[in-house]
Amino acid sequence: MEEDGVKSWVMAVTAQTPTNIAVIKYWGKRDESLILPINDSISITLDPAHLCTTTSVAVSPSFTHDRMWLNGKEISLSGGRFQNCLRELRSRANDVEDVEKGVKIAKKDWDNMHVHIVSYNNFPTAAGLASSAAGLACLVFSLAKLMNVKEDHSTLSAIARQGSGSACRSLYGGFVKWIMGKEENGSDSIAVQLADEKHWDDLVIIIAVVSSRQKETSSTSGMRDTVETSALVEHRAKVVVPKRIIQMEEAIKNRDFPAFAALTCADSNQFHAVALDTCPPIFYMNDTSHRQVLFLIISRVEKWNRFEGTPQVAYTFDAGPNAVLISRDRKTAALLLQRLLFYFPPQSETDLNSYVIGDKTILQDAGIQKVDDIETLAPPPETNANIPVHRYKGDVSYFICTGPGRGPVVLTDENQSLIDPKTGLPK
Ligand SMILES: Nc1ncnc2c1ncn2[C@@H]1O[C@H](COP(=O)(O)OP(=O)(O)OP(=O)(O)O)[C@@H](O)[C@H]1O
Ligand SMILES: C[C@@](O)(CCOP(=O)(O)OP(=O)(O)O)CC(=O)O
């Protein structure tokens, strides 16, 4: 690339960042623009092999303004959240030199250099599967690498937080706590890793994607309304969550599944209770077309857990009609998948390979090789033999089998870059 006789260049970085699922939920802000929460939260980072964002970022003297493409479409970067992240990163950028390419960017030049950002989520965007968490964490992480930002992951988490609160937890793998902090400027509202993904890798996570449609009430406006109108949320933030955070940290440290499951289910239910206590009420789990499926999942899991005398599976639901089920180990996950497929068989023409995605070994462990095997599954032993069981064919879009996973990584293979190294545009 040559412009006005000056040799131009494109320098790019590609990164991959996981999504996360909160087991103690963040719901409510005390500062809207800095995104400071009213309580601590704890999440599990999900394996990026199954759910992740890939983002390539590039800088070139030929770029005229900052631009971003998400899932193949150009989107505006003018929003305050993107702008806050870009500003925070630019202010921490350092000298960058690539002798081979003849690139030299001085720290002070970053204010006048423009970036291109190309991102792709390998799962539905804005459907309650935390795309904003993986997406904003990836944007911050990849730009930090490009700009030679030297701060540690906790500082980066405080920048990602300003893009979307839950994004700060995606800067780490494994089990992560977002400390709400006390400072007015938000400097102590950061994520920290409680334990890495290997600490408790027995856990298997199955997500029932009931709908990949965009949800009706965004988390941002939903939690704003809750803070303004719910009489319960203050009690939750001040009294309930602080105790649960201590108990959850203990449960994770000791790999105590019964305590972990009880806290996870209770906190998911309480989050939906404060959503319902909002004016006007928010029915994330009660959307008419999905409530049957979601309530059935809760009641079956509760019934199974009681039948076994100790929790086998925990459930948690975010701000969308999808269920996240966490089973204590692989054996239980196979039994869970059998139950889920028993109640929610695919439409006859559906291919099993696209109905259960992610870690397929769980499907093998469940002894299911083809759609016909689902037809012949027996009702779970905890069901009452005298009451006819109903099967909800086609009510679940698909299942994702996954587990705890690692934090962000830089992808060094050029083939994985989403940016054309010559033009600086999406490939
Ligand atoms: N890969 C990405 N890179 C940058 N921004 C992204 C990316 N993916 C999603 N986003 C941003 O996040 C927004 C979607 O966030 P939203 O909170 O509505 O949905 P969600 O994150 O899928 O659901 P939830 O946060 O409730 O789990 C998108 O409109 C976009 O602005
Ligand atoms: C229910 C939740 O998933 C809410 C996530 O909210 P967001 O992080 O998407 O909200 P903003 O900070 O306004 O971007 C619970 C959680 O992830 O802790």
Image (spheres, rainbow, N blue to C red):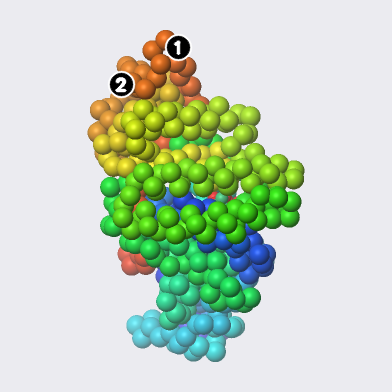
Question: Does residue 380 appear anywhere in the picture?
Answer: yes
**Amino acid at circle 1:** Pro
Q: Amino acid at mark 2?
A: Asp
Horizontal relation, residue 39 to residue 256: left or right: right
| Marked residue nearer the N-terminal end (2 or 1) | 2
Residue 321 shown left or right of residue 369 in the figure: right
Q: Quadrant of residue 111?
A: bottom right
Q: Residue at x 50, y 44 (%)?
A: 266
Q: Position of residue 406 (x, y in %)?
A: 34, 59
Location of mark 2 (residue)? 373
Q: Secondary structure at mark 1?
A: loop
The one nearer the camera, 205 or 359, is: 205
Write down which quadrant ligand 1 falls in: bottom right
**Occupied quadrant, residue 228:** bottom right
Could you classify mark 1 by the number of other residues whose Cα lies within 10 Å: few (under 14), some (14-19), or many (20 or more)?
A: few
**Residue of label 1:** 388
Query: Where's residue 163, x and y in %?
Result: 58, 65
- In terms of depth relative to the viewer, which is nearer, 252 or 6? 252
| 169 displayed left or right of 73 | left
Q: Residue at x 51, y 39 (%)?
A: 322
Q: Quadrant of residue 370?
A: top left
Task: List x then y, in percent, for residue 377.
Answer: 32, 19
Look at the numbered disc 2 and give the secondary structure of its residue: helix
Q: Nearer the viewer, mark 2 or mark 1?
A: 1
